Amino acid sequence: MSARTALITGGTSGIGKATAEILHNRGYRVAVTGQRPENVARARAELPEDVLVLAADARSLADTDQVVSEVGARFGSLTTLFLNAGVSRPMRLDTCDEAAYDEVFAVNTKGQFFTLVKALPLLADGASVIVTVGIGATRSLTGNSVTAGSHGALLAMIPTLALELAPRRIRVNAVSPGFTDTPMTRTSLRTVSDDVAATMAAMAERNPFGRLGVPADIAGTVAFLASDDAAYVTGQEIVVSGGAGLAI
């Protein structure tokens, strides 16, 4: 592969935006997607002008078709696909909501799976596919069962997808952030806490490294998985959490 290209879903803020910046700095041609108009507008203003910023709803297969068409016209092929779009809707069993449940699985599971399906013709041999999962998929967190289930479904697919795409040397791996200071994390916490800053400070104190993750922590791992340094890594999950979740 010569020219390096990347499509990052959920790339207009947080981890996705930080990854776009790192990959662009490393010479990639980059496209990002986002749903919220304010995030799309901010990304267009703040990311380098040659980064392709596309408005798309991860739940919509028609939007995904349009994204793939525009990226194909601009780049021709993809060497990296970072499936990062996601939502978090904290809900306990006694407060669960069918519409919220359906939204979580539509974005986090169906949307990401079909983005891979539809982008497959663009993926160059030897390309890298990275999926954002999260440590909540395998560790207990009250009120997180629906979001965890949507991510856990993706995690369960990783080994099979890796084997299916191995004949083309396309690598498929997952990156699982711990608690990371992103706009989505703060929005999610506002639904369960009246003092988000205090809640995040308490979470940081409980982390073995004494801090929460920041988007660049995760973006660096994604950049590694996209690089030739990870050319023999496939079917794996890399947890980036500062040691969170290790204690019994």
Image (tube, rainbow, N blue to C red):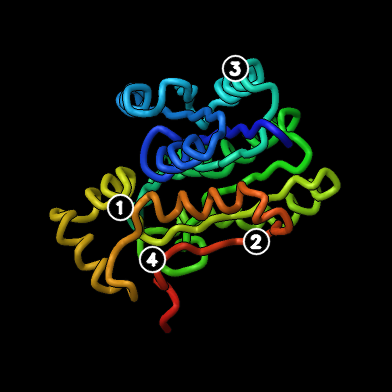
Image coords of residue 91 (percent x, y):
35, 53
Q: Are marks 4 and 1 in contact (CB under 8 Å)?
A: no
Q: Is residue 183 above or below residue 121?
A: below
Of labels 4 and 2, earlier in sequence is: 4
Estimate the spatial distance between the alpha carbons at disc 3 and disc 4, rounded to whole Å: 39 Å
Image coords of residue 111 (percent x, y):
57, 36
Residue with the mark numbered 1:
181
Q: Secondary structure at mark 3?
A: helix
Identify which amino acid the numbered label 2 is placed on.
Gln
Q: Secondary structure at mark 2?
A: loop
Image coords of residue 87 (percent x, y):
42, 43
- Indicate which disc residue 230 carries: none
| Picture quadrant where residue 110 is located | top right
Of labels 1 and 2, earlier in sequence is: 1
- Indicate which disc residue 236 carries: 2
Identify which amino acid the numbered label 3 is placed on.
Glu
Q: Residue at x 34, y 54 (%)?
A: 214
Image coords of residue 34 (percent x, y):
43, 29
Of labels 3 and 4, earlier in sequence is: 3
Of labels 4 and 1, earlier in sequence is: 4
Residue mark closest to the camera, 4 vs 2: 2
Residue with the mark numbered 4:
141
Q: Are marks 1 and 3 in contact (CB under 8 Å)?
A: no
Left or right relative to 9: residue 142? left
Q: Closest to the observer: 115 or 213?
A: 213
Q: Residue at x 56, y 57 (%)?
A: 152
Estimate the spatial distance between the alpha carbons at disc 4 and disc 1, rounded to whole Å: 17 Å
Tell me the crowding category of disc 2: few under 14, some 14 to 19, or many 20 or more residues within 10 angstroms, Cα based. Answer: some
Can the viewer see residue 150 in this picture? no
